[in-house]
Image (cartoon, rainbow, N blue to C red):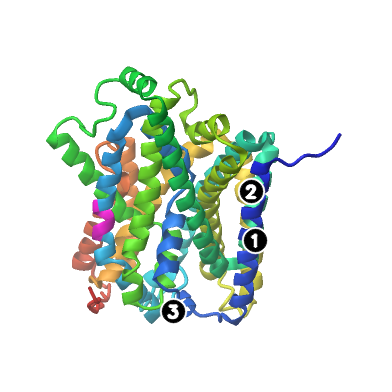
Amino acid sequence: MAFRVTTAEVVFLVALLATYGVAIFARRRSARDGNGGLAEMRFNRWLVGLSAGTTASSGVIATGSVALGYTVGLKSLVLSIGWLLGELVFWYVFPARINRVGRESQATTVSDVLTYKLSGSASSLLGMLCGLIILVCLTGFLSVQWLAGQKFLSGAFGVPGTTALGLFALLIVGYSSIGGFRGSVYTDVLLAIIRIAGSIIALVAIVWFAMHDRTSFSKNIATAGTGFMSMHFGGIAGTAGFMFGMAVAAVCFGLGQPQLFTRFLAGRSPEETRSAWWIYIGFAQFTWISMMVFGALLRGVMPGIADPESGLRIFFQTNTNAVLMGLILTHVFATNAAASNGLLITIAQTITHDLIPCVHRGWNIRRSLLIATLLMGLVSVLVSISTHGSAYNLALASMPLMGAGLAAAMMIKVLGWRHSAASLLCAAVGGIFVAVLWQQLGLGSYLYEAGIGTAGGLVINWLAIKFWRGTTPVARRPQQSTL
């Protein structure tokens, strides 16, 4: 039986080979990197902004966002607007300061930043706790990315279940192992370009089909319900409350996601890092909004899709040629791959720098990162296989808890508020406890758990400094960023 490769598969393979080529190029460049902090990377605003944007976007952008637009219409855009407000606040206040503290402390991980200028057993415990939080939560979230990749390969190429999961993971672990952190950033930029092109192609195609048969499109949209193509969101108070909650979530997300945090540490300077804000926000908002708009318009073009999360692939498989189909498959792969790669590299850094401090033991850091990357790739795949569907719910529950545990401590540290090792430790533990309590009370739908946990952590730090005798508070006056 002859083996045939379709045009769509050729397009996908070319993009995959390009990704590996960039990883190999990065490996050669990284030969001159020392064992110091990420500030040695000296990345410019484009590398910081595009890498942070792709890393921050999980595979849900190409699946869940389409499904959201397909289900509720243009009202889904209110979510992105609220998130945008929070991103503007976050970028105005934090990335430049994060980079400055990172340069001073020669930091590679969140724990390096939090324990900077602190000492004693409480400081060691703080670093270990943060490392464990990141390891557990990000491993669970990475397992979800493998499941998303499994769904992608199964739907696009007909690869059966577990084989698809293992193959997708192998592809990501392969180029992650080759390129390391520098490779992660470089390949992120390539995947960002692919995603921008894919988003433009998707929007142009769906608009063309909607305009081609306006009568049918209007009829299908009408059956979707009144207000489907409206952004009206149930009154001013409800809209404002929802947008405020999303803005708070965006700020906590920026402070509580270590895979995003490391990109800020690697910026060339505080000023260069902060100037990446328009690149990051422009990329993130465009790719997110375009997928929600695509989903809303898709409802008018193909109203009977049983699985809206597969709507992007189904539309192009049904209505376009093989070249466009290949480009869209590459776009979906790029969304999943960048998120998975960023998570995997961050987990490996956490193991080698925080949990098993290879640098301080004189081990070869590049070899140690390679071993950690391969090991955690295998472990996360086993988690995906053993838990499967339940891994998704586990990750959704654990990611807000990680944000609650890290965001308050990071905010205190980079803003230079009074703290001690013991108070930051209490803030991290207390933030998680408050977030768990908020979850158990079923109040997460009113305000993001990480936001409540962050507020609780800030209060706990203040109480610990004020009333816990025997602690020696540290206050670092933050230098003013160039705004």
In the image, taking residue 261 as reference, residue 226 lies left or right, namely left
Closer to the observer: label 2 or label 1?
2
The answer to whether 41 is drawn above or below residue 152 in the figure is: below
* Residue 240 vertical position relative to residue 311 in the rendered view, above or below: below
Q: Residue at x 64, y 42 (%)?
A: 8
User: What is the quadrant of residue 133 in the picture?
Assistant: bottom left
Which kind of residue does numbered mark 3 sit on? Gln
Quadrant assignment, res 209: top left
Instruction: State whether residue 250 appears in this view.
Output: yes
Do tag 1 and tag 3 residues touch (Cβ < 8 Å)?
Answer: no
Q: Label 2 neighbourhood size at 10 Å, few (<14), some (14-19), many (20+)?
A: some
Q: Position of residue 69 (x, y in %)?
A: 37, 33
Residue at point 49% right, 36% down? 312
Q: Which mark is residue 20?
A: 1
**Location of residue 302 with respect to 103 vertically, above or below:** above
Mark closer to the chain start, 2 or 3 = 2
Q: Which residue is mark 3?
A: 106
Residue receiving disc 2: 11
- Callout 2 touching callout 3 (CB < 8 Å): no
- The alpha-carbon separation of the residues under discs 2 and 1 comes to 15 Å
| Residue 162 drawn at (x, y percent) | 68, 37
Report crowding for label 3: few under 14, some 14 to 19, many 20 or more residues within 10 A (C-alpha).
many
**Marks 2 and 3, how far apart at CA:** 41 Å
- Depth order, front residue of 482/411: 482
- Residue shown at 18% from the left, 67% from the top: 466
Left or right: 197, with 26 as reference point: left
Q: Is residue 271 magenta?
A: no
Q: Nearer the viewer, residue 139 or 53?
A: 53
Range drawn in magenta = 85-89
